[in-house]
Image (spheres, helix red, strand yellow):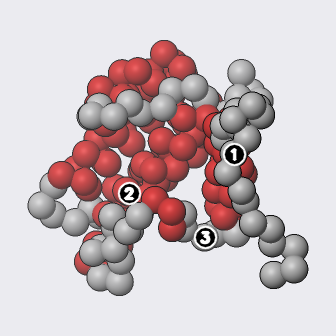
Amino acid sequence: FALRRRRGAPDPDGPEREPVPAVAAALGRLRRAVAGLLGARDTTAGPDPLAGLRGDPRWAHTLAVRETYARFLAHARDAGAPRPAATTPREHGRLVAPLVRDANEELSALIERYHAARYGADPATAADADTASVAEQRLARVLDPKRR
């Protein structure tokens, strides 16, 4: 309370002050990175879109596939290929394909498993979740900017 000061009206002859978006974005990325290392879910993104699947064992593998695809999207974003808004997973896959020439089979496998898990009526199987996980791990290695 003692350190709080009242702000007066801005000085019309003084410098204009605007927020620095690059700093805010960098702080946001740092916060998400630390939260990811600690295993926390990003709560600033709004309600959990997968909340309806959590806790129901029938959908455990579907949840795993969808979370695996989300990790792939983070790797693709970090490699310079973010998923544009209103782009389907398959369209985004075509954008990422040139970056992962050595892992196009894994890219196709992951996208197909995700598409079935996201839009299909039946739960994914353990084999689907395993295939998606193996594919994402290979894609993560290929998309790693330190290796390129």
Of badges 1 and 2, nearer the viewer stands 1
Using a 10 Å C-alpha cutoff, classify the residue at mark 2 as few (fewer than 14 neighbours), some (14 to 19) or many (20 or more): many
Vertical order, 43 against 55 (above or below):
above
For the residues bearing labels 3 and 2, Cβ distance under 8 angstroms? no
Q: Which residue does the image show at 54% across and 20% down from the upper left? A: 99
For the residues bearing labels 3 and 1, Cβ distance under 8 angstroms? no
Q: Position of residue 35 (x, y in %)?
A: 66, 64
Q: Secondary structure at mark 2?
A: helix
Of badges 3 and 1, nearer the viewer stands 1
Q: Earlier in the sequence, mark 1 or mark 2?
A: 1
For the residues bearing labels 1 and 2, Cβ distance under 8 angstroms? no
Which amino acid lies under the numbered mark 1 shown in the image of this protein? Pro
Which residue is labeled 2 in the image?
Answer: 65
Q: Position of residue 41 (x, y in %)?
A: 54, 67
Q: Secondary structure at mark 1?
A: loop
Q: Which residue does the image show at 51% across and 67% down from the upper left? A: 43
Vertical order, 129 against 57 (above or below):
above
Q: Position of residue 71 (x, y in %)?
A: 52, 50
Marker disc for residue 10: 1
Marker disc for residue 40: 3
Q: Residue 105: tell me if it is visible.
A: no
Using a 10 Å C-alpha cutoff, classify the residue at mark 3 as few (fewer than 14 neighbours), some (14 to 19) or many (20 or more): few
How far, Cα to Cα, is label 3 from label 2? 19 Å
Q: Picture quarter containing residue 31? A: bottom right
Q: Earlier in the sequence, mark 3 or mark 2?
A: 3
